[in-house]
Image (spheres, rainbow, N blue to C red):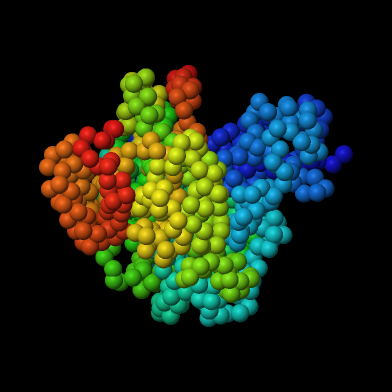
Amino acid sequence: MNASAFDALEVESIAAAEIARALDFYGPDGRGAAPLLPILHALQHAFGYIDDEALPILARMLNISQAELRGVVSFYHDFRRAPAGRHRLKICRAEACQSLGCEALVAYLAQAFHLAPGQTTPDGALTLESVYCLGDCALGPAALIDDELIGRLDKERIDALMSEVRK
Amino acid sequence: MSATRIYIARDSAARSVNADAVAKAIEQQARARGQIVEIVRTGSHGLLWLEPLVEVAGPQGRTAYGPVRVGDVVGLFEAGFLHGAPHDLSLGPVEEIDFFKRQHRFTFARVGVVDPLSLDDYRAHGGWQGLERARTIGPQAVVDEIANSGLRGRGGAGFPAHIKWSAVQEAQSERKYVVCNADEGDSGTFADRMLMEGDPFLLIEGMAICAYAVGSDRGVVYIRSEYPDAIATMGAAVKSARAAGIFGGAFDIEIRIGAGAYICGEETALLESIEGRRGQVRAKPPLPVQSGLFGRPTLVHNVLTLAAAPFILTQGGPAYAAQGMGRSRGTMPIQLAGNIKRAGLFEAPFGLTLRELVYDVGGGTASGRPVGAVQVGGPLGAYFPDSLLDVAFDYESLAQAGGLLGHGGIVVFDDSVDMSAQARFAFSFCAIESCGKCTPCRIGSTRGMETLDKIATGVEPEKNKALLKDLMNVMADGSLCALGGLTHLPVSSAMKHFPQEFEPGNRST
């Protein structure tokens, strides 16, 4: 999921494919904004974030206002408006992981790596994010490194991860 | 020489503690020793504290070893585990482990046993029989079976399922939808995820039964983006069910992926999200059964509700209703999470007490310290002190005790927990996840957090406690949905049961 340069033609082709899929599955109900979330996920997958320049294109293709579109993009925690680091570490901070000490790990990341949730390491290797539940509540503290789930996270594992992503 | 079958979970929880590496090490070690093994990746049995759990098939059935680390693999081979020989990690057959033996596995019967994506396995273990029977007895009789089972919505509200099925069945529309809510956002819950990763065809069969009964030809599974493995497994299962002609051209399913909004677990916000809008809650009425997805009659159910349907259709409603307590019929996949020794999934009839679940089943805290607090039913559920754990785990008993069952998650904290900080977190979570549509939730959550801070730092504590009570009443009565409406529960239960922690200066963070 590396950030790549904005490409209007690719945005159009991603959107067109999802629009066609929605019409195929939902019939007339699939008109308008119905394919919007799949489109935004696909764009973020392709470019690493949702570029502002993509919004007028999507608004035109879906026949919705840009205001509405910006409202949707900003509503969901997943969608980024700017590129993230090469890797993303999502650390769970919900109750089950709290009971197993996740806040101490967040404090450790701040103290040892000067990294707070929402921040990216200066070398662009890793973005840290907070997340509320990864469904690994029996084996917490849990985190997601890119798409890989990590259970029983501890300081040693964080150290190992930080040196891995910097290779 | 025939291959020895070895079963290792592909469930993401098992993978989160290195199941993939263990599988690989076993494969390599077998090759180096010239032994032939066939590794089958299954769902997890739910004995999650024992993952990675390795089972070896033998003439007497499967023998389990766990938790297995990569460093244990050589020793296991040397001890002769391929022939079921004893080892320090021997657990015997999974069915004989107390945690497993005490369960009634209706919904999770196949999870941990079969290859989740094998259609042959699914059929060989009784799959599709519920759907076939449904098609034989007709839509009305299907709804009657659901009514006889006493099944209630497993997402949290506990509403009788058959009333919704009847409503959508009777609704007149050229298009109806069945929507599966797999936006399992409550901390301490993972049953939906385990089911989708461990037996996806069961959910597909449940949806197909439901669609047949209510006259729908389109289903949507809305899965949260935090569950990449469940998304992949469900996607692959839908594809192969479709290719195998299971739907007979009369039904199809789309997988939709959420985007990190807790509120989309609320059914109307979920529908808005599928429609491509902000996940904002709709005012009710109209109910989704009347006007749901794209304004069509829509049946929205949690994963576990839909996944209960195949058992009910195969065995009959009364067989399901025979388990349980009071008006809570059947079984509930209970999730034991957080600081608990034997953490995992425990499917049992309603009616065990919290104390039995936390101590007898769960073994107390993982840290070995005394139990400090137990939160039941997710982030909107009440905190119980150790002294109040004798309440039965069913919808009515928990409600009577000032709590809720929710999606069946139980999170244990040891006595190092700071209840004032937990109460503050409840408000802060509500503030982060509020959809913003109604004022009590959007603003009340932040004001609640500030007022708790004042109490903690000794600013007019009595006055602010009264103010907070008033604010929580407004949120409970004036919010559109359960997020604003129930955030008071963790807060007020913490203040009621742990008053000393709300004395000024007692907060540790």
- Residue at position x 38%, y 72% in the image: B289
Q: Is residue B413 left or right of residue B450?
A: right
- Residue at position x 80%, y 49% in the image: B60
User: Depth check: B288 or B101 in front?
Assistant: B101
Please count the marks in the image. 0
Q: Is there any visible trace of residue B15 in the rendered image?
A: yes
Q: Is there any visible trace of residue B218 in the rendered image?
A: no
User: Depth check: A133 or A161 in front?
Assistant: A133
Q: Residue furthest right?
A: B1
User: Depth check: B218 or B316 in front?
Assistant: B316
User: Image quarter for residue B280?
Assistant: bottom left
Q: Quadrant of the N terminus of chain B?
A: top right
Q: Position of residue B443 (x, y in %)?
A: 18, 50
Q: Is residue B37 left or right of residue A38?
A: right
Q: Residue furthest front?
A: B387
Q: Quadrant of the C terminus of chain B?
A: top left
Q: Position of residue B101 (x, y in %)?
A: 65, 53
- Residue at position x 63%, y 30% in the image: B69
- Residue at position x 66%, y 26% in the image: B71
Q: Is residue B223 left or right of residue A6?
A: right
Q: Position of residue B156 (x, y in %)?
A: 41, 60
User: Image quarter for residue B48?
Assistant: top right
Q: Position of residue B33 (x, y in %)?
A: 80, 27
Vertical placement of residue B434 versus B170, above or below: above
